[in-house]
Image (spheres, grey):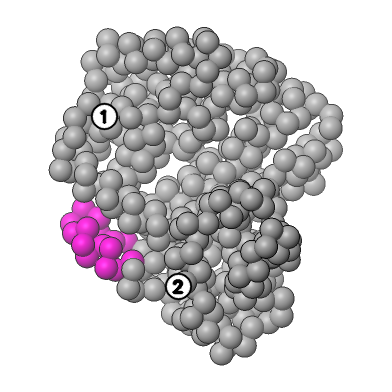
Amino acid sequence: MDIDDKLKQMEQELEKKTRELERKLDEGLGGSTAKKEATPATQARAFKARDLSGKHNFLVNMSREKFLGRLDEIMEEDFNIRSFFGKSMSAYPTVFCETPREIISPLLAAEDWPDAAKEGYIAEQERIAATGQTPPGIGFLGYHLPGVGCFINGWGIANDMGLEPRQVLDDPVGFGQVVNTAAHEKWGHGFISEITSTGVDKQSVQLNLLDIVSRFKLRDVDTPQRAKLMEQHVILFESSVLLEEGFATWTERWLAESMAEREQKWAHLPDSAPIYTPEEVAGTFRSIGQDNWARSVECLFPAHEPSPDQVHEILQEHWPPFIEALNGADEVFAAGRMQPPPYVIGFLMLNYLAQRQGAKCVPYAVATAANVSYGLENVSNHDLRNFVNNNPDLNLNRRFLSLMYLHPGRPNDVGEFLGRCREEAGLAPPAPK
């Protein structure tokens, strides 16, 4: 397939997915929804997308780099995603956005605004960007839009670095940020949103989209339905944030190392990818006088195989107060020059399991932890909060914690691992499609 055919195919895929997304929004929400040697990038081909929605002015100049597709290939090859789950993230495009218009427009396509209002909003963001400032709502590196694709904020990365967007792809630091962002957003958050039972459940009421759109403060009316959905988002966020940010952060590191192993030109990528060890994190806490935090990390991630009694003690006695303390620990982690708590502790959790069971088991552990369907279209928020707070089997963070301590089996034996998820942890793993 030549480049023109490929670009046409991407346009068609985006058109189909955007229209389906809008249909679901109209049905579910009433149509009122709110960062060594330079690596040479493949020559980008800019194109102008057609009016993808039929009623929205969604005209976006987008470019796609070949290496972004390589991330998909590596995940497919190493984890056998498509053959097990029957679908894959590689079906969704990864787009490098070079202007504020490009990063904002996919989200505006989900808003039932007149075209003139959308154009006015974009024009205001472009006016702010022209002054060198970051417009409100786009101070992030990228996002995965459920059912549509992954969008990388190339403009924002370039603006922070004092570069032009195309220069980012030739800069080792900027290129690393692009790779890390695509890994984090598409194969981290996107995998959970598109592949797992909880992600599908959240998509049924558009919770993922609601969260992303809310960053832009785009809504023009408040409704009880929106308030209910935002409360659901908060409830589920609190009970899954370690799993979600941990997996997304772990995926950044794993993909950077995998790409570096495959081609010398990507050897610098692990330099920019996050990595933590329990020993280093505990040592950092002690260096800033946080001995209690250091002891908690050493308890949760024991250096030696924990006995059944130790596991029971961790789950019943140490985990609840640790989770409660994490909610107010941002300043403590910042003092240690670390990422926010969910990223650090979540990464340690995912990596602890990878070291015990093998890296190939990690996405399947995540899918097992997120193999929960709450029936969000019908459950009350009171019941939902009660479920996730009082039933460990319905709390995604707690489900993954129980998988962390499964006795090590044959490394990277996914079938055996899923069997032990059911037999030892008592959790239902996902069934192959």
- Which element is circle 1 on? loop
What's the residue type where badge 2 is placed? Answer: Pro
Q: Is residue 433 above or below residue 148?
A: below
x%, y% of residue 172?
A: 76, 30
- Which element is circle 2 on? helix
Magenta stretch encompasses residue 379: yes
Residues in magenta?
373-388
Q: Which residue is mark 2?
A: 320
Disc on the earlier residue, 1 or 2: 1
Residue located 54% across and 27% down the image: 153
Residue 145, picture quadrant:
top left
| In the image: residue 355, left or right of residue 211 | right
Q: CA distance from mark 1 to mark 2?
A: 36 Å
Q: Nearer the viewer, residue 192 or 328?
A: 328
Residue located 59% across and 37% down the image: 181
Q: Nearer the viewer, residue 171 or 424?
A: 171
